Image (cartoon, rainbow, N blue to C red):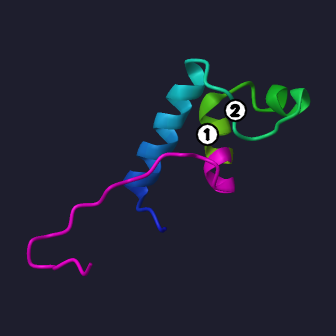
Amino acid sequence: MEYNKFEHARIVGSRALQISQGAPLLIKLSEKDLERIGYNTLEIAKMEFKEGLIPITIKRRQSEDKKQEK
């Protein structure tokens, strides 16, 4: 699924908040890698997003003139 810049920011920001509150990392990073990025939760969340590991979904509203096919 393609995300627009607002959805991307929301997903990465939400995941960074989860990590900062103690959620386990979904990407394998060595201690050296973590030190290199300064344990920055936003950078970790960006890496997880790039790898497609973030379990967050977006629901989009459709306008009323567009009909959903079932």
* Residue type highlighted by circle 1: Ala
Estimate the x, y position of residue 65 in percent, counting from the top left: 9, 78
Residue identifier under label 2: 25
Picture residue at 69% right of the left edge, 55% below the top: 51
Q: Which residues are magenta?
A: 48-70
Q: Secondary structure at mark 1?
A: helix
Query: Does 68 sit above or below residue 45?
Result: below
Q: Quadrant of residue 30?
A: top right
Q: Locate the C terminus and report the quarter of the image it occupies.
A: bottom left
In the image, farthest residue toward the top: 21
In the image, farthest residue toward the front: 70
Badge 1 or badge 2: first in the primary sequence: 2
Q: Is residue 68 left or right of residue 54?
A: left
- Give the Cα distance between marks 1 and 2: 9 Å
Picture residue at 55% right of the left edge, 18% below the top: 21
Label ID, residue 57? none
Residue identifier under label 1: 45
Q: Quadrant of residue 35?
A: top right
